[in-house]
Image: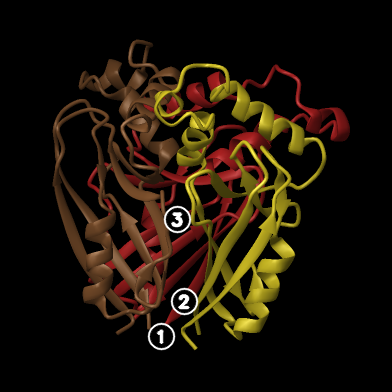
Chain colours: A red, B yellow, C brown
């Protein structure tokens, strides 16, 4: 079976909600029967991102603070001037963090570090229903 | 057919020219006959990047402004001191944005959001001819 | 052979040690006998990153300076307040730069630019032994 796909659905609580999806991705990999290959985790949409982080309460503060420091909400965004949806900074943040990540699968398991979790980062300014595509390829 | 490749060629107009390549990537996927898998979009070169963005005129201003704010042209770069090509900031920006992106293919289509386009970002200081590698794998 | 894996081991010299692993990744690709596909380079761990850069002495100064400018060591990190390991900035930097990169393989070779090298970036505050997973898929 060279490719196997499932979607993960999430209800986010609002801006900068960071959700650990490691367990759900691992479950998809197990159901895929792919023991050697890689899994692509991807969010369709331009105001969300996938990355990894040590999922502990301190970094769930530090990561949003860094996003706010580098891409402040309060400065002028042309996107907002045109569309008035107030999320110009969300789009810019998403283009930097990017919506994709690939993780190796070996012996049917994700090859992550012990303190490394796969997360979805909600960058939009309101709670959203999100679909995350989890696609495993390999043998 | 487990792997299929085409190159996209671009003539960029200069620094921070952002080009929507979604339609061309989708066409490659269609010609690949791969209906389930993923496509890697990659720029060989150290002064360009691939990401996604809602391709509308506001963000085509906001994204370059963020790059200039975070990695200003006018500060000292050791790369420039050595090579005098004036593009130290281009290289640093490219290492942060990265030259690769993977997008899932399902039923022969890219699984992108409605307002999410794949873009090449020219980070070098002059117009360039660019080759983008589009490689689909799957079944 | 649809998937082939080897690990690269590195002994890093400390924070912001940037190591060119291009030659070793290419060797893995050659041993894989995969001539058409892609290779995933991934660091298991939450304080390291994979990217590409022109590997020359100037940028080995410029890239660390940008990381320090954007994510300073000396500001408050909640991660540090809780764990006292002094590497809150390392984790935040790693979530931005990300631990994964995919590079196309064509005719058995990595499709990189001439001045583009694959690097591991040590973001932790001390020398570490690192395992990098190199996984090729294709035909």
- Residue that carries the numbered disc 1 in the rendered image: A1
Camera-near label (2 vs 3) is 3
Classify residue A129 as left or right of residue C64. Answer: right
Labels 1 and 2 touching (C-beta < 8 A): yes
Q: Classify 10 Å Cα crowding around label 3: few (below 14), some (14-19), many (20 and above).
A: some
Secondary element type, mark 1: loop
Q: Residue at x 23, y 33 (%)?
A: C17
Labels 2 and 3 touching (C-beta < 8 A): no
Secondary element type, mark 2: strand
Q: Give x and y (percent) for residue C12.
A: 16, 37
Q: Residue at x 18, y 60 (%)?
A: C7
Camera-near label (3 vs 1) is 3
Q: Are marks 2 and 3 on the same chain?
A: no
Front residue of this view, candidates B59 and C105: C105
Q: Residue at x 25, y 76 (%)?
A: C32
Eyeballing the image, is B128 above or below A79? below
**Distance Cα–Cα, label 3 vs label 1:** 33 Å
- Residue that carries the numbered disc 2 in the rendered image: A4
Q: Classify 10 Å Cα crowding around label 2: few (below 14), some (14-19), many (20 and above).
A: many
Front residue of this view, candidates B135 and B110: B135
Labels 3 and 1 touching (C-beta < 8 A): no
- Residue that carries the numbered disc 3 in the rendered image: C113
Q: Classify 10 Å Cα crowding around label 1: few (below 14), some (14-19), many (20 and above).
A: few
């Amino acid at each position: 079976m060279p490719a196997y796909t499932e979607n993960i659905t999430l209800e986010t609580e609002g801006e900068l909600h960071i959700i650990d999806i490691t367990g759900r991705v691992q479950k998809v990999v197990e159901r895929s029967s792919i023991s050697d290959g890689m899994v692509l985790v991807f969010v369709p949409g331009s105001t969300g991102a996938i990355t990894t982080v040590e999922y502990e309460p301190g970094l769930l503060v530090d990561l949003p603070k860094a996003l706010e420091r580098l891409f402040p909400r309060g400065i002028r965004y042309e996107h907002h001037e045109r569309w008035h949806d107030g999320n110009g900074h969300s789009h810019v943040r998403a283009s930097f963090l990017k919506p994709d990540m690939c993780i190796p699968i070996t012996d049917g398991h994700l090859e992550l570090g012990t303190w490394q979790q796969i997360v979805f980062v909600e960058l939009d300014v309101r709670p959203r229903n999100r679909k995350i595509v989890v696609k495993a390829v390999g043998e």
